[in-house]
Amino acid sequence: LIEEFMVLANCAVARRVAEAWPEAALLRLHPQPEESKFGALARALEQQGMPFRASGAHELAASLSACKKPGDPHFNHLVRLISTRCIAPAKYFRSGAVPREQWLHSGLAEPTYTHFTSPIRRYADQVVHRLLAHAIGWEAAQSEEAVESEEAVESEEAVES
């Protein structure tokens, strides 16, 4: 449940920063799987009587879910591990550098995606936090508070001296 909320938050933030920064939003895409990259795996599975299709994210997910061997609880995990070697990695991009129709994160089946929910672990999340802060006007408010706070400290120092 938490992971689903994180994905939803990442998607909502991606839409907002892309709207506010159409040329400069930091987003993430994951290209559609290329069926040709799965040739050897598909042939091996079909020899085991398991049809395998990877023409799109949904077909790949369905094929992976169907790859089960009775009596071998590790088979599906192994097939999934091998399949990750056939998939292009996800990558970050600047919104203005990639046509909108290519923004799809096919691994999540989301049209617009970014990393936002782990600023402690990823620098990209920190960048997106800053973009969002400016987009919603929070960064400006924080800057004004910092100036007011600095002025208050300076006036206290003046009183003390």
Image: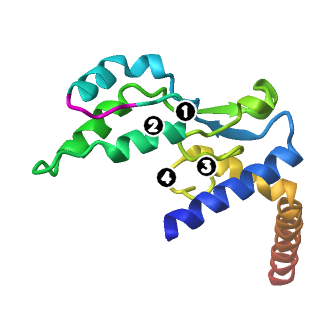
Q: Dot 2 corresponds to which residue?
A: 60
Check contact, mark 1 vs mark 2: CB within 8 A. yes
Which residue is labeled 4 in the image?
A: 121
Mark 3 or mark 4: name the one nearer the start of the chain: 3
The Cα atoms of the two marked residues, 1 and 4, are separated by: 30 Å
Q: Nearer the viewer, mark 3 or mark 1?
A: 1
Q: CA distance from mark 1 to mark 2?
A: 6 Å
Residue 56 is situated, as x and y percent measured from the top left of the image, at 54, 33
Q: Is residue 155 above or below residue 47?
A: below
Quadrant location of the C terminus in the rendered image: bottom right
> Up-down: is 51 above or below 119?
above
* Mark 1: amino acid: Gly
Helix, strand or loop status at disc 3: loop
Q: Can you identify the residue that label 3 sits on?
A: 115
Q: In the image, which disc is placed on residue 56?
A: 1
Quadrant in which residue 9 is drawn: bottom right
Label 3 vs 1, first from the N-terminus: 1
> Measuring 37% from the left and 31% from the top, which residue is drawn there?
52
Instruction: Name the amino acid type tagged 2.
Output: Leu
| Label 4 residue SS | loop
Name the residue at 65% across, 55% down: 10
Where does residue 25 sit, x and y in percent of width and height?
Answer: 77, 40
Q: Which secondary structure lies at badge 1?
A: loop
Residue range corresponding to the magenta coloring: 48-52
* Amino acid on which the number 3 mark rests in the picture: His
| Residue at 29% from the left image edge and 31% from the top image edge | 82
- Taking the magenta stretch, the answer to whether it contains residue 15 is no
